[in-house]
Image (cartoon, rainbow, N blue to C red):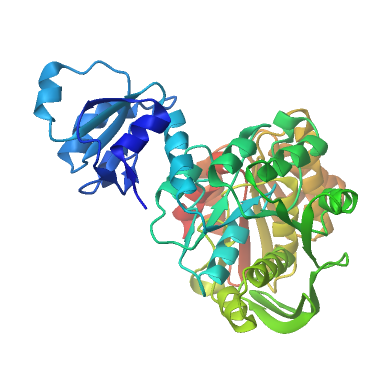
């Protein structure tokens, strides 16, 4: 089910400078370095990079088609590439979204699971996709490609797939609505409503409103929610007669719950009570958050008519995307927890609690700033400091402008001053870590991605 050049021209109102309207476009790329023979190249223009400068390179590397903005093209170039397809559009990002929408419309029987939430989107996506692929040919969002460019590219990668698991992120109101209308989910999942991006949105109520935009692209709203989240629990009760809502949780009574939980440092097991059916689940990652993820995966699996055995296999064999609770074992029994991709109060709290429950010789937290918190930044960083002290972390290293509030609040709540160090220079932090690491230490790295703590991890492993 491929689009033809004429379909692309029609949905984008583009201009074909040269080419064959009947030619099909199967594979799409925005990077000339990885272009394959026959690909369609999208010239994406960003703040610091203009893909329109590289359309010729795309052709030379094997592309059959380029979609570019209305830049000046010489007659000589049109003649040179007369056997290729050159399509000009007003805005390549908008065209990308229009073409993806057209592509999605070709897949009438496709199961699309849309996933959003303040934290846990990627790990939930990974576990749901691994469950569903036990029965169906499944495509999922790669890495963190969950925005107005990444979501369309995932759709454009559809071939003979039966299921698409698509993560949707946002910074502002209106963004998930746009993504939902492109992907048209048949099942939507909201993992939680926390404080991520509260600086942009102003309140948790607005964050909830933004997450609920995932319903905008659904023909028949079918929503799976974390019933332990206060905002989602309240909303579900108020809207149970309006929207078809399915629930999972560990604390509040839900359709899919965990019983007899056995927790170990790097895994957990429990009896999954889902739709009045009970079966055992083994989760290969420790922490309550992954129990919730597994419950969500089990519920979606049931909704997609998977057997208990297929659900069990999908959950027990799933792997996390890199930089999200990534466990790295070093010599001398030293363990690194690389959770450096993103951070909010909720995910910080979960990671700190996980560290606290390990059997480490010393529990060391290396924490950095959380971004996009606006006027709430000091308050929320201080709450992280409270969690560090409450969970009796042995050593606290912090870096970043607002991380000083983490340090201050940890000391205020009983952590010894000599066990807290605030770093200004990254090299100083790296050197300190190399000098103090001992056998049996477990070291957590957690901050917003822009802090690039993963680079520090790379320097010490």
Position of residue 231 in the picture relative to residue 103 (left or right): right
Q: Position of residue 74 (x, y in %)?
A: 16, 16
Q: Is residue 396 visible?
A: yes
Q: Position of residue 399 (x, y in %)?
A: 63, 41
Q: Judge by depth and name the residue closer to the eye, 319 or 222.
A: 222
What residue is drawn where x is 73% and y is 31%?
201
Q: Is residue 419 visible?
A: no
Q: Position of residue 225 (x, y in %)?
A: 75, 56
What residue is drawn where x is 10% and y is 19%?
76
Q: Quadrant of residue 31?
A: top left
Q: Quadrant of residue 160?
A: bottom left
Q: Judge by depth and name the residue closer to the eye, 354 or 300.
A: 300
430 vs 45: above or below: below
Q: Judge by depth and name the residue closer to the eye, 191 or 446.
A: 191
392 vs 184: above or below: below
456 vs 32: above or below: below
Position of residue 202 in the picture relative to residue 318 (left or right): right
């Amino acid at each position: 089910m491929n689009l033809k050049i004429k379909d692309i021209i029609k949905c984008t109102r583009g201009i074909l400078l040269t080419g064959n309207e009947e030619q099909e476009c199967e594979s799409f790329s925005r990077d000339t370095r990885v272009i394959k023979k026959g690909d369609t190249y999208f010239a994406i223009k960003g703040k610091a990079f203009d893909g329109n400068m590289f359309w010729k390179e795309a052709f030379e590397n094997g592309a059959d088609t380029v979609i570019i903005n209305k830049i000046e093209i010489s007659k000589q170039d049109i003649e040179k590439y007369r056997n290729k397809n050159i399509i000009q559009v007003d805005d390549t990002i908008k065209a990308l979204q229009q073409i993806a929408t057209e592509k999605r419309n070709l897949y009438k029987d496709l199961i699309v699971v849309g996933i959003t939430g303040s934290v846990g989107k990627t790990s939930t996506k990974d576990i749901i996709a691994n469950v569903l692929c036990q029965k169906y040919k499944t495509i999922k969002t790669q890495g963190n490609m969950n925005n107005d460019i990444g979501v369309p590219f995932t759709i454009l990668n559809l071939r003979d797939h039966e299921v698409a698991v698509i993560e949707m992120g946002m910074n502002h109101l209106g963004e998930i609505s746009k993504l939902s209308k492109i992907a048209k989910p048949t099942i939507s999942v909201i993992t939680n409503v926390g404080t991520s991006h509260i600086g942009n949105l102003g309140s948790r109520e607005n964050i909830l409103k933004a997450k609920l935009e995932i319903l905008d692209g659904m023909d028949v709203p079918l929503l799976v929610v974390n019933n332990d989240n206060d905002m989602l629990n309240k909303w579900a009760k108020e809207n149970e007669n309006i929207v078809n809502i399915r629930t999972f949780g560990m604390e509040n009574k839900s359709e899919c719950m965990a019983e007899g939980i056995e927790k170990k440092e790097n895994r957990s097991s429990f009896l999954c009570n889902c739709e009045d059916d009970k079966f055992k689940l083994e989760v290969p990652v420790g922490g309550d958050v992954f129990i919730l993820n597994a419950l969500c995966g089990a519920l979606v699996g049931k909704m997609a008519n998977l057997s208990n055995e297929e659900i069990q296999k999908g959950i027990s064999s799933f792997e996390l995307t890199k930089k999200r609770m990534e466990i790295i074992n070093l010599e001398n029994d030293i363990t690194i927890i690389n959770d450096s991709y993103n951070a909010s109060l909720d995910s910080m709290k979960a990671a700190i609690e996980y560290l606290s429950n390990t059997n480490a010789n010393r529990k060391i937290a290396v924490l950095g700033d959380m971004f996009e918190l606006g006027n709430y930044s000091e308050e929320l960083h201080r709450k992280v400091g409270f969690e560090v002290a409450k969970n009796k972390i042995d050593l606290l290293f912090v870096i970043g402008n607002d991380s000083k509030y983490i340090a201050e609040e940890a000391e205020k709540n009983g952590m010894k001053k000599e066990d807290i160090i605030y770093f200004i220079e990254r090299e100083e932090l790296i050197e300190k870590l190399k000098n103090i690491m001992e056998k049996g230490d477990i070291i957590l790295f957690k901050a917003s991605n822009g802090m690039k703590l993963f680079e520090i991890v790379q320097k010490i492993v």
